[in-house]
Image (cartoon, rainbow, N blue to C red):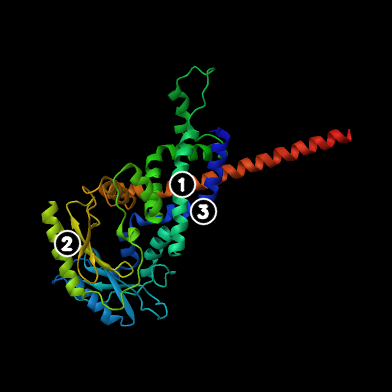
Amino acid sequence: MNRAILVWLHRWAGLTMAGFLIVVGLTGSMLAFLPELDHFFAPEIHPGRHAGAELEPAALLRRAEALAPNARVNTVYLGEEGVAQIGVEARPGEPPLAFDSIALDRVTGEELGDRIKWNGLPTSRAGIMPFVYSLHYELAMGRVGAWILGIVALVWTIDCFVAFYLTLPLPSRANVRSYLARWKPAWLVKTRSSAYRLNFDLHRAGGLWMWGALLIFAWSSVYMDLNGVYARVTSFFLHYEQPIWAATPDAEPRADKTPLSWEIAQATGARLMEERAAADGFSTGPVTAFYLLRNKGVFEYRVHSSRDVGDRHGATSIFFDAYSGELRRLDLPTGQHSGNTLTAWLVALHMASVFGLPYRIFVCALGLVIAMLSVTGVYIWWKKRAARKAHSSAHDLQKGLAKVS
């Protein structure tokens, strides 16, 4: 393809994405240290591990139902020691709730801190990091925001390859230096130069040095926000099974039946997980989440297991029918399908849940680099545009003087 066309595509793709990438880059830097920042802003909802027997997931869900009788309880997330995050929604036909999450002490069942709404502007310190998370994942706009960021992520993925190609030196018979020697300047930043040259070098060299990480984060963002496209591409190369939330169409809850009780569903999930662990040869650890996906008609029972990538987030799940308890599916992060194993690693890298503190620092820095690349790209465009306008004005002036003379 003509190089000029690729330059044009890179320029306008970058300008279109710039504002979005600045937002996701800066919020992503914060999310690399989400637990620590959330604890800083709202220590009252992070009691940590303390003495006493922890309540079962079903008991915590029952406690939330008692505390918020006007809400419909759907989920309990147990990824943090000492606290349970309960997800709720408005009952059908009822007005929207001012909150969608309740934090409970896992030992006493007492409510911790303020109730928060993840998609809304923070009304207390406890809502700051949930808002940052929502802004990063879906522009704090729900499904519409997720769809927008999915399109941005797809364009970003393609642009990674375009940008890389544009750093390569042009073929030249006159230049006898080796190809790598001619490519070397693209990797360097000349600090003693003009502001424009410094911005250009930062943009080009920063993109090259971080290219692999940028591609990983761009493509994993497609998985999170535009899963249909991700599934088609991944399935073309690898054996990939879509997540149940993407593969199963929404359905209205059955009017003739009610879902299994929390207690029965929890026992069913534990039994099915134990059976599948024995059959498939993996070991399980603590429960990390227990969800009722009402629009899919299934329960999800999630645990830590020996098949997880990293140890921060348990991601081994059993899905079973919400009414009959029949097993629907087992999702193993690794060792089940090659495409799903790759996906589990992409997600773990994106969420900084592997390789400990050094990698979290790297992800934090990468978010700043993403914002920097967007800012420098806009600056380069603006300076070139100003130069073109100045050149055009000078040319028009010369033509005018020529006519007068």
Give the residue type that dot 1 points to: Trp
Q: Position of residue 132 (x, y in %)?
A: 40, 62
Whether residue 320 sits left or right of residue 220 in the image: it is left
Q: Quadrant of residue 47?
A: bottom left
Q: Extreme left residue here?
A: 278
Contact (CB < 8 A) between labels 3 and 2? no
Vertical arrangement, residue 210 with respect to residue 62, above or below: above
Q: Amino acid at mark 2?
A: Pro
| Residue 224 vertical position relative to residue 270 in the rendered view, above or below | above
Q: Residue at x 35, y 63 (%)?
A: 249
Residue with the mark numbered 1 = 156
Q: Position of residue 188 (x, y in %)?
A: 45, 33
Residue designated by label 2:
286
Q: Are marks 1 and 3 in contact (CB under 8 Å)?
A: no
Quadrant containing the C terminus in the rendered view: top right
Q: Amino acid at mark 3?
A: Gly
Q: Which mark is residue 19?
A: 3
